[in-house]
C-alpha cells in the first residue's frame, strides 16, 4: 500500500515522502491517526504542487538543520554511570540520557530525534541525531564507571621470628 506521510516517522520516512507499508499498518494506524494519507493519483499531484511552492521554505529548514548539525560535529559525550562489580550498568544509557548530556553542553536536542541502541555496559557507543532527512549527525558516547572498583593494595606483613631462649630446668 502506498501512502504519503504527513509527519516524520523515524524508521519509516519523513514528511511528504511516498512510502510502501503493509495495508494493516496503513489502514489501522497511520491513516486514522492522521500521520498519513493514501497516495492516490490526485494526492500525488497535490503533493507535487505543494512541494514546488514550498521549495524555498524547505531549503531554509534544511540550512537550519545543517547549522544545528555543525554544532554537534566533534562533540564526544562522556557519561558517568553507576556500575556493578561485573561491569554492567544499573539501568542503561539511552536517548533521553544523551539528550540531557547535550543540554548540559548547551545544545538543545529533542530526545525523539535521537536514535541509538541502549548501552548497558561500560564502553563506547554511538547515537544518531536526525535533524532533517538529509542531515544526520553521529555522536560518539563513552560510558565511564562512576564507582570504579578500587583494587585493594597488597598488604605487606612483617614476618617476626620468635626465638625461644632455652630455659634452665
Image (cartoon, rainbow, N blue to C red):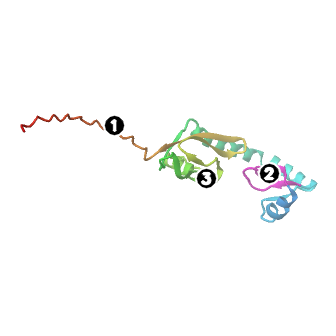
- Residue 141: x percent and y percent? 56, 41
Residue 84 in the figure: left or right of residue 56: left
| Residue named by callout 2 | 16
From the image, state whether disc 2 or disc 3 is nearer to you.
Answer: 3
From the image, state whether disc 1 or disc 3 is nearer to you.
Answer: 1
Q: Earlier in the sequence, mark 1 or mark 3?
A: 3
Q: CA distance from mark 2 to mark 3?
A: 22 Å
**Secondary structure beneath label 3:** helix
| Residue named by callout 1 | 154
Q: Residues within 10 Å of mark 3 (few under 14, many from 20)?
A: some
Residue at position x 82%, y 59% in the image: 25
Q: Earlier in the sequence, mark 2 or mark 1?
A: 2
Residue at position x 84%, y 50% in the image: 18
Q: Residues within 10 Å of mark 2 (few under 14, many from 20)?
A: some
Q: CA distance from mark 2 to mark 1?
A: 66 Å
Over which residues does the magenta segment extend?
A: 1-21
Question: Does the magenta run of residues contain 2?
Answer: yes
Asked whether residue 66 is in view, the answer is: no
| Residue named by callout 3 | 111
Q: Quadrant of the C terminus?
A: top left
Q: Earlier in the sequence, mark 2 or mark 3?
A: 2
- Residue 42: x percent and y percent? 92, 55
**Secondary structure beneath label 1:** loop
Q: How many marks?
A: 3
Asked if labels 1 and 2 touch by Cβ distance under 8 angstroms, the answer is no
> In terms of depth relative to the viewer, which is nearer, 99 or 109?
99
Asked if labels 3 and 2 touch by Cβ distance under 8 angstroms, the answer is no
Amino acid at each position: 500500500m502506498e501512502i504519503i506521510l504527513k509527519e516524520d516517522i523515524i524508521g519509516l520516512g519523513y514528511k511528504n515522502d511516498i512510502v510502501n507499508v503493509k495495508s494493516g499498518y496503513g489502514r489501522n494506524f497511520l491513516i486514522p491517526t492522521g500521520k498519513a494519507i493514501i497516495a492516490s493519483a490526485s494526492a500525488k499531484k497535490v503533493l507535487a504542487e505543494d512541494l514546488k511552492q514550498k521549495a524555498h521554505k524547505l531549503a531554509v529548514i534544511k540550512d537550519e538543520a545543517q547549522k544545528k548539525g555543525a554544532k554537534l560535529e566533534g562533540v564526544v559525550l562522556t557519561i558517568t554511570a553507576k556500575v556493578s562489580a561485573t561491569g554492567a550498568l544499573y539501568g542503561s544509557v539511552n536517548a533521553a540520557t544523551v539528550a540531557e548530556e547535550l543540554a548540559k553542553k548547551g545544545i538543545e536536542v529533542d530526545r525523539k530525534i535521537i536514535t541509538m541502541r541502549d548501552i548497558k555496559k561500560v564502553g563506547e557507543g554511538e547515537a544518531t541525531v536526525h535533524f532533517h532527512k538529509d542531515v544526520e549527525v553521529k555522536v560518539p558516547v563513552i560510558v565511564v564507571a562512576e564507582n570504579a572498583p578500587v583494587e585493594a593494595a597488597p598488604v605487606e606483613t612483617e614476618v617476626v621470628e620468635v626465638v625461644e631462649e632455652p630455659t634452665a630446668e
